[in-house]
Amino acid sequence: MASKSTLLISTSFLLFFFSTTTTTIQLCFAQIPGNNLDRPQSDSDCTGRWIHIRQLPPSFNLDLLSNCSGYPLFNDFCPHLANNGLGQKTHNISHSWYRTDPLMLEVIFHRRMLEYPCLASDPQSANAVYLPYYAGIDALRYLYGPDYNSSSEQGLNLFDFLTNDDPVSWYRHMGQDHFLVLARPAMDFSQPLRNDPPLWGTSLLELPQFFNVTALTVEARAWPWQEHAVPYPTSFHPPNLSLLETWLQRARRSRRTTLMMFAGGGGVGNNPNIRKSIRSECENNTKANNATSNNNLGRFGSGGVRYTKLCDIVDCSHGICEYDPIRFMRPMLQASFCLQPPGDTPTRRSTFDSIVAGCIPVFFEDSSAKTQYGWHLPEDRYGEFSVFIPKEDVVFKETRVLDVLRSIPRAKVRRMRENVLEMIPRVMYRRHGSSMGLRAKKDAFDLAIDGVLNKIKSRVPVQPRVFP
């Protein structure tokens, strides 16, 4: 049976590597060899886990990348295509840190899929079918480009291809065994089909043709069964176990001299909102501490923990932190708690940045994480690694975030931080081509695959594999 597995996995799949210049992007291609490092020992290791990568025309993926500088109203994302979507290294000698753009999740996921150990060349014998469609990148032409008035049409050409090129694979389960990745919140693909004039977003997830397809997105809506959220990619992508363990030790030993910190923008308008309340509390506390600088009692937390700073704000307005992780990771390493208030949408990449830094996240609404990332952050364990303070209590009932956090016993803070550190492998996307030792630890990609297979299995019964 192992030889049949080898036959399936040795099927040619394109890898893509990007080198950027100031004006062009050069696409180079290679092939994955048949002796894939992740290959299972036997077919039995892949029972119920076979995935077929649907071969799509390049207009649905690679061709979209060649227009990376073609959206004047959007940032030029050409530099972020480097290292198969991880972006450029933060510095030349870095092995784990990159200037990663979350919009590249579709590219990162595609690259990792090519290393998946249970690839099936025949869609009829697969338990799931992955569609390498870069929907978030394709959406740019509807959101920022010339096709704004046609935003309800995103996905129609993909459906036409799937049903005409290989109708048997699609209609076998009416698309219920298919899945794709969306590197934008689901709301960006949820414009009602008959909106006239069109509002923000496209209608990809509103098309009845795709109601059965599982969509992995960085932020899901509460009601559609087919959507499930996966972590935003951070800038941390270690290639081996040693570098991961070195980082874990650094985060564990880091001196936490700040009680709480917030990295982000917003909160400067006239209307009451959680970010404005956080900024006001932080600024007022700083002024009070400056006025009573000789009185250090206000700088102690519960259990006698002394902080040199009670609150720190890293202003990330206008996207200045987006591709500079050093700007916010250092303050996060120095803080015990990292505040995660919702902004334009409930979720934040900063949630996962703070976990990577070993900084305990503080949430203000359940939809920021608890009801989103159940495959990666178990819902029944949130009290063990995070703090929840209802935003209404802070904004309208004058609850002070500092008071809540200072009341948490020192021993509990230590336990919570250890639990956060344990979560780091679960929310990071390790580098493609990583070492065997690191592959033994399931990362965000692995847990997403486990989740999507279980989700599809609940709707499509596992069928025996048939070999030619």
Image (cartoon, rainbow, N blue to C red):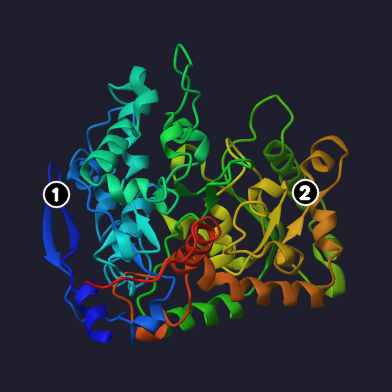
Image coordinates for residue 255, horizontal then vertical, percent = 63, 74
Q: Is residue 429 left or right of residue 303?
A: left
1 vs 2, front mark: 1
Q: Mark 1 and mark 2: span between their CA atoms?
A: 47 Å
Q: Residues within 10 Å of mark 1 (few under 14, many from 20)?
A: few
| Residue type for callout 1 | Thr
Foreground residue among 284 and 447: 447
* Mark 1 or 2, nearer chain start: 1
The residue lying at 44 percent from left, 29 percent from top is 203
SS category of the residue bearing label 1: loop
Q: Is residue 321 left or right of residue 56?
A: right
The residue lying at 35 percent from left, 26 percent from top is 153
- The mark total stands at 2
Image coordinates for residue 151, horizontal then vertical, percent = 37, 24
Foreground residue among 348 and 278: 348
The residue lying at 39 percent from left, 73 percent from top is 238
Q: Residue furthest top?
A: 196
| Residue type for callout 2 | Asn
In this rendering, is residue 256 above or below 186?
below
In this rendering, is residue 103 above or below 2?
above
Please indicate, yes or no, whether residue 276 appears anywhere in the rendered image. Answer: yes
Image coordinates for residue 251, horizontal then vertical, percent = 56, 75
SS category of the residue bearing label 2: helix
Q: Is residue 313 left or right of residue 247?
A: right
Q: Which residue is mark 1?
A: 21
Foreground residue among 56 and 334: 56
Instruction: Specify the quadrant that holds the N terminus.
Output: bottom left
Q: Which residue is mark 2?
A: 285
Q: Which mark is residue 187?
A: none
